[in-house]
Image (cartoon, grey):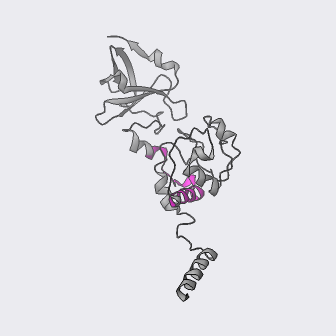
Amino acid sequence: MKYQLSIFFSIAMIFMFPVQNAGAEGDPERGKNLFSQCIACHSMTPGEHLTGPSLAGVVGRDAGSVEGFGRYSQALKQSGITWTDETLGSWLKAPEQLVPGTSMRIRGIADPIARQDIVAFLETADASSGAAESGAERGAGMMGGTGGSRLVNLKEQSARQQVAGMRYCGDAYFVTLGTGETFTFWEFNLRFKTDSSKDGPPRGKPAILRSGMQGDRAFVIFANPGEISEFIRNAC
């Protein structure tokens, strides 16, 4: 009986005075490391929008409202949500559960401590101090990958980045660089993109970013869609 009473009072004390988890408020340093998985799609620089909107100053902001980003889903814009610790945590856990119909298609983060850490980072990150990686740092690490985000400044191209000419023959593209070198790509391995931002290529001077394990794939980035057909010659 005495043993049972002891257990009863121990359980009661737990409910009356919950044990504080050391990471209950979130650790911004751990959150910064976890956020590195997000930087291909989200910048922490104000006004720099990638696949997703900039998350600079996201805490306290109305969902779907950041200036300059026009690809929000109607579901998010009409959600009436304000981003707080609680709503950000719910979003990171299951975006589609919080906002059915959202275009944010990620599985979600099951670990509640990881979610708290990321939210703590978003709360404390100072975008002007480089708390998250800059676009240039992301570009240095991902130019050889297949990511779809704008990661480098293409206004100042090196000769090896500049496309001087391009022709199409059979199932291949022949791309001549500013260095005079010509490289051949199977048509399925060459992708065309546009970048109309301040960091995009000058009109008439598309840029190329190589990718793939063997360098056999690439992105050619134009200033606008109208340039693509004008620039590529059909010639064998």
Residue 54 visible in the current orientation: no
Q: Identify whether 70 is placed above or below 192.
A: below
**In the rendered picture of this protein, how many numbered marks are placed on residues?**
0
Q: Nearer the viewer, residue 168 or 155?
A: 168
Magenta stretch? 113-137
* Magenta segment, prevailing SS (helix, strand or loop): helix
Query: x and y percent of residue 129 in the render?
Result: 54, 55
Q: Identify whether 78 is placed above or below 34.
A: above
Residue shown at the point (46%, 56%) measured from the top left: 33
Which residue, as the protein is rendered here, is positioned at the far top? 235
Q: Identify whether 206 is placed above or below 101.
A: above
Residue shown at the point (67%, 39%) measured from the top left: 77
Query: x and y percent of residue 29 in the render?
Result: 49, 61
- Quadrant in which the N terminus is drawn: bottom right
21 relative to 214 in the view: left or right: right
- Quadrant in which the C terminus is drawn: top left
Query: x and y percent of residue 68 in the render?
Result: 63, 37
Which residue, as the protein is rendered here, is positioned at the far front? 1
Which residue, as the protein is rendered here, is positioned at the far bottom? 2
Residue 6 visible in the current orientation: yes
Q: Identify whether 173 is placed above or below 98.
A: above
Q: Is residue 98 magenta?
A: no
Query: x and y percent of residue 203 in the render?
Result: 50, 24
Q: Quadrant of residue 219?
A: top left
Q: Nearer the viewer, residue 129 or 82?
A: 82
Q: Is residue 133 magenta?
A: yes
Residue shown at the point (32%, 22%) measured from the top left: 186
Residue shown at the point (36%, 15%) measured from the top left: 168
